[in-house]
Every structure is written in C-alpha cells, then in structure tokens.
Image (spheres, grey):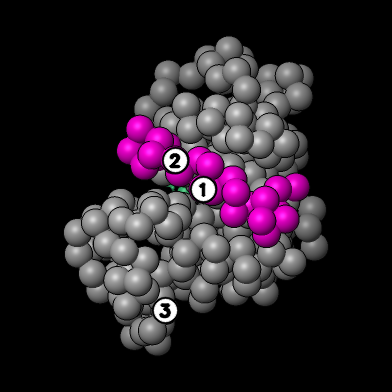
Amino acid sequence: MIAHRGASAYAPENTLAAFELAVEQGADMLEFDVHLSADDQPVVIHDETLGRTTSGAGRVRDHSLRELKRLDAGSWRDVRFRGQRLQSLQEVLERFRTRIGFAVELKAGSAVYPGIEDRVVSLLEIYDVVDRTLVLSFDHAALAAVARSNPGLARAALLEPRTRLPENITAVTPRGATAVGLPARLVTEQRVRAARAADLDLYIWTVNDPARMDSLIEWGVRGIITDRPDVLRSRPRFA
Ligand code: G3P
Ligand code: CA
C-alpha cells in the first residue's frame, strides 16, 4: 500500500501534509520523486521545473536548496496548505524513518544529475532505511548504478506507458532489477502471473478505483501505488 506522492488526492503532492496524511491513513510506503538542486542536494518534487507545484519558476537544478526552501509548495493546491515547503530527501528520511517505508523515484540518473545515485544511496544508508526502501526509475542505467552502490536495495524498473509490452514481462525487464513498475493500463492477470513465476515483485501505479484495487490484490501484485491510501485500506483484504 504505497501513497503516490503522499496521500496526494487530499493534500499537495510530495509535501509533509500529504506524507503525514498517508501515515495517518495507514500506508506502508511513501512514494515520492527526487531531483537534484544546484548544490547537489536531492530534493523531493515531481517535475524538473518549479512552476506547477510551487511559488517559484525555472528548473530545480538552477536553485540552491536554500533558495528552494523559501518557496511555497502548498498554495497552488488550496490556501489552507499555504506554508508547505519543498523537502529535501534528508528531511523526509529524518522525519519518517521510523514510521513508514519509502518508494523513492529517481526522475533521472547521472546522465542528467551526475552522482545522484550515490547521494541518494548514502542518505538511505545513513538513515538506516535500506531495508524499508524501494528505488524506482524509468532510467534503468540509474538503477544499475544504485545496485553498484548498494546491491541490497530493492530496485523497480518502471516500464513506459507507451511500451508495447509482451505478456511475459520478464522478457523486457532489465537485468539487475528486483522488481517492475507497470502503469495500471498495462496490467493483465497474465502479466502478473509471469512476474510472480519469475519471482519478480510487481508494483502498479496509479490505482484509485476500488474495483481495480480488488482485482490487483486478488492477482497478487506486490504493491499498489495510489493517491487514496484510505480507499485502498478500506478494501476487504485490508479491513
Ligand atoms: O512510481 C511510479 C509513478 O510514480 C511514476 O509516475 O509521473 O507519478 O512519477 P509519476
Ligand atoms: Ca513518481
């Protein structure tokens, strides 16, 4: 039960408000996205630019963490969230490390953000959360770099929504991934079966429909990534 950008149906994505609510609603993991600041700090935000979800503008990469912390990351959603701030990865780990697991999505690896994999892995080690963290990425080279840095970290290769996917998804799973992430529209029972037969954990995003949650639970996927942890928690399997 993985809270997509926190409980993002109810609070601004990737903020403390959304993360605290996800914990309250009983999620097992917080899913969030990471980019690097100008001073090479991993920062929790979905887009590579600031315009959609903060009071700032331009690229995350062109601002220091100090500058990023001055921005408002809540008002875009609703005035009652005014004052929510962007979080560094370090701040999120510090605050939640004993309360919940983490699904950390690297939006890009070293090709865009040199050294990001080592920076993220070293924070996960320092905060002692390696065994409660899944690293996800569409950038499969980034996952390979994570594996070199710490082979003990679970790594999910995200497959593009555009991909023409065979029913045997293990055929397109990069070597070295311990798991696969599939967009909801590409999931079939046969694909779930193929992953399970190969001992590959399967994570599905973004699932907010209760009936869809029920089939995925029945088929035996490893994780469901949802904006509505309360809805998932209320399904009979979890009740
Ligand atoms: O972790 C999978 C999912 O979050 C990828 O899509 O755009 O929500 O980051 P997006
Ligand atoms: Ca994500």
Q: CA distance from mark 2 to mark 1?
A: 6 Å
* Residue under label 3: 84
Neighbours of disc 1 within 10 Å: few (<14), some (14-19), many (20+):
some
Residue at 60% from the left image edge and 18% from the top image edge: 175
* Residue under label 2: 115
Three-letter amino acid code at the position of disc 1: Arg
Nearer-N-terminus badge (1/3): 3
Residue at 62% from the left image edge and 31% from the top image edge: 147
Q: In the figure, 155 relative to 214: above or below?
A: above
Q: Are marks 1 and 3 in contact (CB under 8 Å)?
A: no
Where residue 119 sits: x, y (%)? 51, 48
* Residue under label 1: 119
Neighbours of disc 2 within 10 Å: few (<14), some (14-19), many (20+):
some
Q: CA distance from mark 2 to mark 3?
A: 28 Å
Residue at 76% from the left image edge and 24% from the top image edge: 199
**Quadrant of the snapshot with the C terminus:** bottom right
Where residue 85 sits: x, y (%)? 41, 75
Of circles 1 and 3, the one toward us is 1
